[in-house]
Image (spheres, rainbow, N blue to C red):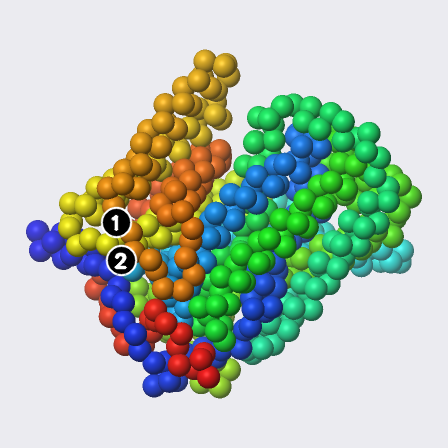
Amino acid sequence: MSFWSQFASSALRSKPLAAKSDSNSGEYLVRRLGPIDLILLGIGASIGAGIFVVTGTVARDAGPGVTISFLLAGASCVLNALCYAELASRFPAVVGGAYLYTYTAFNELTAFLVFTQMMLDYHIGAASIARSLASYVINIFELIPSVKDNIPSWVGHGSDDIFGFISINILAPILLVILTIILCRGVGESTLVNTIMTITKVAIVLVVIIVGAFEVDDSNWSPFAPYGFKSMLTGATVAFFAYVGFDAVANSAEESKKPQRDLPIGIIGSLLVCIILYAGVCLVITGMVPYNLLGEDAPLADAFKSKGLNFVSILISIGAVAGLTTTLLVGLYVQSRLYLGLGRDGLLPAIFAKVHPTRHTPIHSQIWVGIVAFVLAGLLNVTVLSHILSVGSLAGYSVVAACVMTLRWDNNQVSKRMEGITCIIVIACCGFVAGILYRYGVSNLAYMFLILPIAIAIFAAAGLQFRQVYRDPPGFSCPWVPLVPAICIFFNIFLFAQLHYEAWVRFVVLSIVAVFVYAFYGQYNANPGNDDTFYYHGVPEVAAE
C-alpha cells in the first residue's frame, strides 16, 4: 500500500512556478536566436521533401480542391500554433515544450507520458528522414552518367530487407554523424546551416511556383472539387501532417534572445510562410497537369518533365535534399532539448542534464539522440513503422491546448478543476467518436450520427466557457479561450481516429511501458522544484540586456 500511495502522490505532483535569474549557473544554454532565426527554424522543421510529393499525392484524391485541403489543414495548425505561442510566451526561458507545459498544468506522470509518445515519433521520424535524405543524395550523384547504376543499393537506397525489417544503409548514419557534430559544436553553427539550407529550400520552391505558373492551364482547375467536399476534408487530414514541426520553435525558449516577444513570432510566422508555399505548389501542380494524370512517386517533377522543363526536376531534387537536411537537423535539435529538460527534472539520468561549459549545448543528450538515429537508420527499414507515427504529435498538440485552458483557470476549488478536466476529456472522446464515424461511415445515415458527438462536444465547450473563470495570461494571449483550444482538441483527436489501428495499439502499449518506467525509476528520482530549472512570467534579465 505504501508503494501505491507513493506512486499516486508522485504521479499527481506538478511543477511549481518560480521566477529566478539564470545568471547564477553555468548549466544553461546561450541566447543567440532572434525572430528571423526562429522563423527559419520553424520552416526548416515543417517543410521537407514532402512539399514536392505530398501535394501531388493528395491532389490525386481531392483534385484541384487540394488547395482547400491544405488551407483547411493550415487553419487547424494555426489554432494549435496560437496555443503553443501563448505557452511559449508564458514559459519563455526553459526548454521542454509540451512536456514542460503538461508538467506545470497537470501532473508529472501525464508529462512523462507526453514525452514518451512524442519522443518515439521523433526517433523513428529522424531515422526515416535520414534514409530518405541518403536516397536523394544518391539520386543526385546518379545524374552523373558514369556513376549511374554503379552505386550498390546498400550505400544509400537501402539493401533488400532481411527478416522483413533489417535493411543496411551506409550513407544515412554518416549524414547523421555530420549533423550531430554540427549540433554539438553550438547553436550558432547549427543555426547557420539551418539558415543556408532553409533559404535554399524556400528559394527553390518559389522558383518552382513561378516557373510553373507560366505553364498553368486554368481549364485543369475545372471541376475544382470533382469528388465533393468530403474528399477535400479527407485530404486535409493528410495535409495536416505536412505542417507538423512548427512546435519545434517552442523548444528553443532557452536559446531565444527575447523569448516572450520572439517565440510567438517564430511559431506563427513560420506556419504562415508554410501555408503560403503549400498553397502555391498545390495551385501550380493541379494547373499544369490534370489531377488524374499526376505521377505516383514524384508528381511535381513528372509534371515539369511533361512540359519539357527537365532542369526543374533537378532543382526539385536539390530542394528535397535541403528540405530533408533542415528537417533532420531541427528534429535532432528538438530531441536533445527535450532530453535536457527531463534530465534536469530527474525523470531521466542526470547525464542528460549536462551542458557543455563553453559550447553551451547539451552534448550528452545530443550524442544519445544521434546514436539512436544512427542505429535505426543504419540497420532498420523504418518505413515499415511509418504508419504508427503522428500519434505523439497529435497527443502533444491536444495536451498543449488543454494546458492553455487549465493554466488560465482562476479558482482553487478542486471540484471546479475536476469539472473542467472532465469537460476536456468529453471533448476529446467526442472527437474520437466523430472520427470513427467519419472514417467507417458507409451511408448517409451513419454520417447523420456525427451530429451527436459534435453536439455533446459543443455542450462540453459551453461548460468550459460559462462554468470556469479565466485570467489574462502574461505575454502573448491566445484569442477566444476556451473555444480555440476546444476546437484544437476535438480536431486533433478526430485526426487520431484516422490513423492506422496499429498506431492506436502503439499508443496504448507505449503508455503502459512509460508508466512502468516511471513507477520504478521516475517517481524516485524526479525533482519538480529543481533549482537548475528556471521559469519566468516576465523577460529574463539576460534577454532584456
Looking at this view, name the residue that lies furthest to the left.
Answer: 1
* Label drawn at residue 102: none
Residue placed most toward the observer, 219 or 11: 219
Q: Position of residue 278 (x, y in %)?
A: 67, 47
Looking at marks 1 and 2 on the same chain, the residue that comes earlier in the sequence is marked by 2
Task: Tell me if residue 46 comes above or below residue 449 in the rendering.
Answer: below
In the image, residue 161 above or below residue 268: above
Residue position marked by numbered label 1 in the rendering: 469
Amino acid on which the number 2 mark rests in the picture: Glu
Which residue, given by chain and number where applicable, does mark 2 sit on?
108
Of residues 125 and 494, the one drawn nearer to the viewer in this rendering:
494
Direction from residue 347 to residue 361 in the image, left or right = right
- Give amino acid for label 1: Val
Left or right of 303, for residue 230: left
Circle 2: element type: helix
Q: Which is nearer the eye, 311 or 343?
A: 311
From this view, report whether residue 56 is shown above or below residue 435. Answer: below
- Asked whether the beta carbons under mark 1 and mark 2 sit within 8 Å of each other, the answer is no
Q: Would residue 430 be seen by someone viewing this image from the given angle?
A: yes
